[in-house]
Amino acid sequence: MDKLRCMEAFVAVVETGNFSAAADKLDVSSVMVGKHIRQLEELLGARLLQRSTRRQSLTEAGAAFYESARTVLEQVRVAEHSIETMQATPRGLLRVSAPVTLGACAIAPLISGYLRQHAEVKVELMLSNTRVDLIEEGFDMAIRIGALADSELVARPLRPYRMIICAAPAYLERAGVPRTSADLPNHQCLAHLVWNGRTAWQLEDKPEYAWPAETRFASNDGQALRAAAVNGAGLILQPEVLLADDLAAGRLVPLLQSHVPAARPVNLVYLRDRRPRRKLMSLVEYLLERMG
């Protein structure tokens, strides 16, 4: 039994005056309207309508129930309207998870532009290289690098994540320009402390030449490595998004472009929803337009 549907039928009969007019209003048959009224009366254990051949009149119990039922239905309509309005106009909080470097260098600037277009939306951008559980941790969306295994998520591809090898002009003038990956052991190669034998980037042309493990300068932060490279400390292997501005300005020079590791896929993921929220889809569409 659908209580709300039965209440809706009862209120329609009261307001239209008979079962036939109520049926037209609700776009159902008169028989179905009568069934809903009977179910409601059985549930309440009281007769709500006095029936005659032409018109229905309210009993005392029916009159009392009508006022309450009308109030409940109005509250339901208000609740539905609030959701419809929310879906039509982006508003509310969006929680987004992204990897540290990609999130700081690419996602954060784009979200800034998105917020200028959508004044009623707030965004929390959490940067972490650990994959979050969207449901358990309450995220609306995540940006993920690498192969996906979450079949319950909607995945939208973004621009691939590319690595680049480069160095400052001053360093190359002093140490020479490497021509092949075999030249790397003769250069100062800046290392990330998170890398190890399992996670270090393997070069594309000759996997036996991994990025040199021995280094005079290492850091656990890509921005620190970038700053050191710009100041001539050595060769750097880092994401293109981190180095793009320095490359464009000539502060760093790309090297060994056919040797860099293969680009990895990047996906924007979110939970499946039969009627996705407008605020979520507005950000999805914004990011896809600029990074897809």
Image (cartoon, helix red, strand yellow):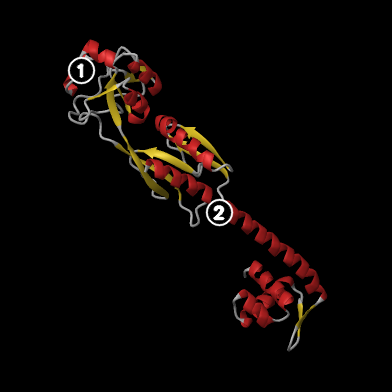
Left or right: where 292 falls relative to 281: left
Q: Amino acid at mark 2?
A: Ala
Q: Disc 2 or 1, which lies upstream in sequence?
A: 2
Find numbered disc 1 in the image and state the secondary structure of the residue it sits on: loop
At horizontal 80% and vertical 77% (from top left) the residue drawn is 59
- Quadrant in the picture for residue 47: bottom right
Q: Position of residue 242 (x, y in %)?
A: 37, 27
Q: Position of residue 288 (x, y in %)?
A: 40, 44
Q: Amino acid at mark 1?
A: Val
Name the side, left or right, on which 164 lies relative to 280: left
Q: Could you say which disc has been placed on residue 177 in the image?
A: 1
Q: Are marks 2 and 1 in contact (CB under 8 Å)?
A: no
Question: Toward the viewer: 90 or 101?
Answer: 90
> Which element type, helix, strand or loop, lies under badge 2?
helix
For the point 49% across and 37% down, the residue is 113
Name the residue tied to disc 2.
88
Number of on-image labels: 2
In the displayed image of the protein, which residue is found farthest to the top? 174
Q: Is residue 289 above or below residue 48?
A: above
Q: Position of residue 196 (x, y in %)?
A: 31, 24
Taking the image as shown, residue 20 lies to the left or right of residue 244, namely right
In the picture shown, does residue 33 fall above or below 113?
Answer: below
Snapshot quadrant of residue 224: top left
Alpha carbon separation for disc pair 2 and 1: 56 Å
128 to 77, vertically: above or below: above
Q: In percent of the image, x 30 and y 30: which residue is there?
A: 163
Looking at the image, the residue that sits furthest to the front is 249
In the image: residue 78, left or right of residue 197 = right
Nearest to the observer: residue 140 or residue 151 = 140
